[in-house]
Amino acid sequence: MALPSTGAISMSQVRSELGLSGSIDLGNSLVRSLAGRASGAISMSDLRGKSAVAGTRVRVTAGSTNSARGYAVNSYGSLSPTSVDGVTIYGITTLSGTPGNLTIWTSGNVPWSKIMYNGVQYNITLITGKINYAIAPIPNIYSQMTGTKDFYLIT
């Protein structure tokens, strides 16, 4: 989803567009890249109509059970939307035993090749023989999977 092409733009909108959390400012390298201003003066108007990704955002409100965190259908957490590119997502989870892996459970073939989190893209690996199960290596994702997190699925 692109930033507004008219009207006010807030840093909160910019942070959301970039899939980031925490404090950011116009000097942030990801903000500069989005604005197309590698150096020199930059203003909010440079961000009008800009889009960070071509993928689809999925928002996980993390829940947990035993050693798992994230979203699992009919179990814990929530996800919006629950269907992307015609594929139902049953879970986006991480386990304490594999704290650097994010697992995506779906209703069929995983059509996405990458997932973006906090402005960084990670490759999605389909697990051999499992058409509905893929893993993305995201450092320390287990400790970060609390509250609400935005992920972008990219084909």
Image (cartoon, helix red, strand yellow):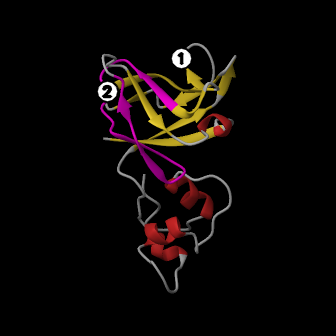
Q: Residue at x 37, y 17 (%)?
A: 107
Q: Label 2, on which residue?
A: 86
- 142 left or right of 134 in image: right
Quadrant hosting residue 26: bottom right
Q: From which residue to which does the magenta span run?
A: 102-127
Q: Is residue 18 magenta?
A: no
Amino acid type, callout 1: Val
Q: Could you tell me residue 16's position as x and y percent?
A: 55, 53
Kindly give the residue lying farthest to the top in the view shown: 74
Q: Residue at x 51, y 56 (%)?
A: 18
Residue 122 colored in magenta in the image: yes
Task: State the image quarter where residue 63 is shown.
Answer: top right
| Along the viewing direction, whichever of 100 and 84 lies nearer the viewer | 100
* Mark identifier at residue 120: none
Residue neighbourhood size for the residue with mark 2, other residues' Cα within 10 Å, grouped as few (<14), some (14–19), many (≥20): few
Identify residue for label 1: 73
Residue 112 location (% of width, % of height): 33, 36
Mark 1 nearby-residue class (10 Å; few <14, some 14–19, many ≥20): some
